[in-house]
């Protein structure tokens, strides 16, 4: 009887020990899993910060677009000059790579049948991108912002030239390629939508633009 009890006690102690070892192994596996998850999150965070740094910097761009002008008494007809121009500025993304800010200067000009239209502005935009690939080199984006602009209009048939300072509003969508290349479709609301001076009047539509930006 004594040996039977001894054997039972030994077997019970062994089962308890095995159970404790199994619990220890499960706990160790759980800790390893948590550490792997934390390491993955840290790697992702560092990768996003590195990508954000790649998208920070100076950029230059070229633009083409269109606007409709209606002037009186010079012609009483709508004109649709082709606008062309350039811009340059600096963009700064946050650590999450998704959103950021950019500040830039922009100049547009259109010439048609003896008349000239100019729009110069300094702008501050919010930009946001959604990655399209795992390396985050391609993205679809949105932008919107405001600026201070100057509009000038002149034609040979009437003087003096019309001009005005005012607020500019920028809206649009973008496609980023290989981080450094960005193509944008934009809408710009100019400072002048209606300008009257003496017997003259200038009214305009919004400016519709396509642009290419190169990041340095």
Image: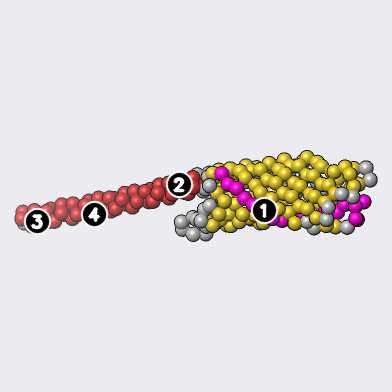
Comes first in the chain, label 3 or label 2: 3
Q: Is label 2 in a helix, a strand or a loop?
A: helix
Q: Is residue 171 magenta?
A: no
Decide which of 152, 6 is in the foreground and name it. Answer: 152
- Mark 3–mark 1 Cα distance, whole angstroms, equals 90 Å
Comes first in the chain, label 4 or label 3: 3
- The disc at residue 101 is none
Residue annotated with mark 1: 63
Q: Is label 1 in a helix, a strand or a loop?
A: strand
Circles 4 and 3: CB distance less than 8 Å? no
- Counting other residues with Cα less than 10 Å from the Cα at mark 4, is it few (<14), some (14-19), or many (20 or more)? few
**Residue at the spot 69% in from the left edge and 55% down from the top edge:** 64
**Residue at the spot 76% in from the left edge and 42% down from the top edge:** 150
Residue annotated with mark 3: 7
Q: Is residue 69 magenta?
A: yes
Residue annotated with mark 4: 22
Place of residue 128 in the rendered image (x, y in percent of width and height, measured from the top left): 58, 50
Decide which of 35, 196 is in the foreground and name it. Answer: 196
Q: Which residues are magenta?
A: 58-76
Outermost residue toward the bottom?
133
Comes first in the chain, label 4 or label 2: 4
Comes first in the chain, label 2 or label 1: 2
Circles 3 and 1: CB distance less than 8 Å? no
Magenta span dominant secondary structure: strand
Residue annotated with mark 2: 50
Place of residue 19 in the rendered image (x, y in percent of width and height, measured from the top left): 22, 54
Residue 81 can be seen, yes or no: yes
Q: Nearer the viewer, mark 2 or mark 1?
A: 1
């Amino acid at each position: 009887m004594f040996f039977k009890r001894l054997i039972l006690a030994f077997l019970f102690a062994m089962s308890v020990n095995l159970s404790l070892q199994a619990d220890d192994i499960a706990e160790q596996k759980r800790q390893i899993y948590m550490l792997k998850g934390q390491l993955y999150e840290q790697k992702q965070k560092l990768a996003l910060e590195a990508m954000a740094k790649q998208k920070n910097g100076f950029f230059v761009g070229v633009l083409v677009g269109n606007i409709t002008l209606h002037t009186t008494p010079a012609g009483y007809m709508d004109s649709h000059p082709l606008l062309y121009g350039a811009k340059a500025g600096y963009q700064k993304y946050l650590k999450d790579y998704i959103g950021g800010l950019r500040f830039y200067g922009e100049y547009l000009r259109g010439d048609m049948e003896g008349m000239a239209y100019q729009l110069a502005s300094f702008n501050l935009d919010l930009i946001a991108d959604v990655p399209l690939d795992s390396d985050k080199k391609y993205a679809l984006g949105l932008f919107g912002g405001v600026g201070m602009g100057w509009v000038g209009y002149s034609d040979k048939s009437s003087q003096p030239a019309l001009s005005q300072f005012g607020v500019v509003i920028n809206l649009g969508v973008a496609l980023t390629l290989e981080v450094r290349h960005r193509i944008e479709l934009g809408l710009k609301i100019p400072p002048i939508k209606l300008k009257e001076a003496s017997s003259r009047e200038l009214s305009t539509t919004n400016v519709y633009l396509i642009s290419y930006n190169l990041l340095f």
